[in-house]
Image: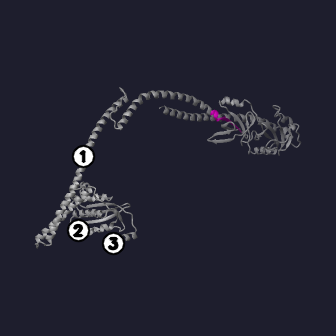
Amino acid sequence: MTAVLAVVLASSLFLTYGALTRSAEGAARDRLTRAVRQVAVSVSEGTRQRASLLAAAAATPEMRAALGPASDTNLARPVLASLAPARDGEVLPIELWNGAGALVFSVHPELNAPWQAPLTREQLARRATTASAGKVPQMLGVTFAPMYGRGEKVYFWAVAPVRNGNRLLGFVAQERHVTGPASATQSLRNLTGEPITMYLHNGDGSTWVRAPGFLAPAPARRDSAAGAITRQRSGVGLLIAAEAPIDSTPWSVALEIPVREVRGRARGTLMTLAGISLLLVVVGAAISWVISRRVTRPLVTLTNAAEAISRGEFAPRAEIGAREDEIGRLAHSFDQMASEIASSHWELERRISEADLARQEAERANRAKSDFLAVMSHELRTPLNAIAGYAQLLELEVYGALNPAQRDALLRIGRSQAHLLTLINNVLNFAKIDAGQTQYALADLYLDEVLAGLEPLIAPQIRAKGLVFDYRPCDPALQVRADSEKLQQVVLNLLTNAIKFTPPGGGVAIDTEEGDDEVQVHVRDTGAGIPADRLRSVFEPFVQADRSLSHPNEGVGLGLAIARDLARGMGGSLRVESVVGEGSVFTLTLPRAPAVSEPLRETADYSARN
C-alpha cells in the first residue's frame, strides 16, 4: 500500500510539474508579448521625435539655399549644428549631401575620416529615394538605415530629403548612437516581475543591441512554433522570447527570459508539494502498517490452512481468536467448509473404493462373457458343421433315394444351418472386437477393386428379392487406408442389411464421394426407413432396426454394431441418415491414401497377378 501510495503521489507530482511548467511558461510569454508591444510603441515615439527634428531642419530655406545654384552653406551650418550637440564628449557627423549622395559639407569636418558605415553615402541616398517612392519604410519622410556596430557601440544613419517643391535637391544625413535610459531594463523587470533582458536588432537579425546600447551577439538558434519563440544563447541556455517591429523603421524590439528562471519557480512549488507528499506517504505507511497487522495475520493463518487442505491435510483449522468482524466470519465459514470437505473426501474415497471393486467385477464379468461367447460359438459350430455334412450326404442320396418332400426338407435344414452359423460367427466376431483381440492389417487399397468385387457375393440375394442393384464406379486410382478383409466385411454387412430391409421391386446402390483427406462410401436403399427415435440405437449391439412393415426378425442385431467397430478400428466412422417411407443411407468414412501414379499402379497390378 505504501508503494502504491508513493507511486501515485510521484505520478501526481510529475504531472503537476508538467502542468506548472506549461502554465508558468505560458504566463511568461503572455507578459513578454504585452511588454514588448509597449516597448516597441515607446521606442517608436522617441524615434518619431528625432525624425521630426531632422525633417524640420531639411525643410528650412537655409537647406534649399545650401543645395541651390548659389551653394550658400554658411546659413545651413548653424541649423545642422543645432540638431545634435555633443553628448558624453562624443561628436557624431551631421552632413549635407546632394541628390546623388555626394558630400556637400559636414558640420564637423574634423570627422571626415574614412567612411565606416556598412552602406555608402550613395547607397543611403538611393535607399532614401526608394523610401520616398514607398518601397522602404520611413517616418515623417525620414529614412532610418539598419544599425551597425563600431567598437562596443552601435550606430545608425537617419536621412531626410531636401526638396524645392517636388524637385529633390539633396539630403540631410545624421549619424546617431543607439542608446537609452540605463534603468529601462530594470523598469521592465519591476513591471512584469520577470528577469527580462531587452534587445534591439535589425529586422534581418544582423546586428543586436542590448539595452541601454551595447553591441550583443546574435542568438545561436531561433525556433518559432504556434506563435511561441524560443532561442539559445551561449552561456544562458534556452530562452523564452517575444518580438515586435518598430513602426516605420528596419528595427525590432526583443525581450527574453531564461527558461530556467521560469521553471525554477515551478520547481519551487513542486518542492513544496513534494514535502507535503512525503509527509502523506509517511503517515499513510504508518496507517497501512497498523491496518495490515490486523488484517494480514488472520489472512496468513487462513492461507496456511487452505494450503494444508490442498495437500490433503484436513485437520488444520483457522485459529484466529474470537472476532466478530468480516474476517472472523470468514474464518468460521472456512472451518465449516474444511469440516465438510473432510467428510466429503472420506465419503468420496469410500465410494471410489467401492467403484473400483465394481469396475473390477465388471471387467471380470465382461471377460467371462467374452470367454463364454467364444467357447459357446466354437462349441455350437461343431454340431452345426456336422448337421451340414449329414444334410449334404442325404442330398447326395448316399443313404438312398429322396422324394421331393424330403429334398425340400433338406434344403430348409441347409438354409437354417447356414443362417445359424452366420449368427454364431457374428457373436464370435463381436466378442473378439469387444475384447480387443481383432487385428488390423492396414494398407493402401484401390477402393474400386474392393467394391466391384462385392457384386457377385450379393447377386443371388438381389435376384431372389427382385431388387435393382446400382454400383457407380469411382476413380480407379482412388486409394483408401484400410484392411481389405475388414473393409469387405463392413460394406457387405451394409449391403446385406439394405437388401434385408428393402421390399421387392426396390433398389440398392453404392456410390463414393472424395474429399481432401477422406473418402465416403454411401450404401443407399429404398426401404421403409428408420424412425428418428431409433437412429441413435441402430449401431448398438443386439438392437434390431425394425424398419420394414413386416418386421423381419432374422439376426440378433450385431451386424451394424460389428460394422461400426470395424470402421473405427480402421480409423474411420459409420453413420446413417434415414427418412421413413423413402429409405436410408449408410455412410462409411475412411482415411484417403496418397495418390499413386498410373505407372506405379500398373506395377502393383502386375505384382498382384503374379
User: Which image quarter is the C terminus in?
Assistant: bottom left
Q: Which of 195 and 511 is in front in this view?
A: 511
- Say which mark, if any, is on residue 609: 3
Q: Is residue 420 magenta?
A: no
Residue at the spot of label 1: 358
Q: Position of residue 376 (x, y in %)?
A: 19, 58
Q: How far apart are marks 3 and 2 (CA)?
A: 30 Å
Q: Where is residue 340 in the image (x, y as percent from the top left)?
A: 30, 35
Does the residue at mark 3 contact the one at mark 2 (Cβ under 8 Å)? no
Q: How far apart are marks 2 and 1 (CA)?
A: 48 Å
Frontmost of labels 2 and 1 is 1
Residue at the spot of label 2: 462
The amino acid type of the residue labelled 1 equals: Ala
Left or right, 578 with reference to 38: left
The amino acid type of the residue labelled 3 equals: Arg
Which comes before the other along the chain, label 1 or label 3? 1
Against 500, is 267 above or below? above
Secondary structure at numbered mark 3: helix
Q: Position of residue 441 (x, y in %)?
A: 32, 62
The amino acid type of the residue labelled 2 equals: Ile
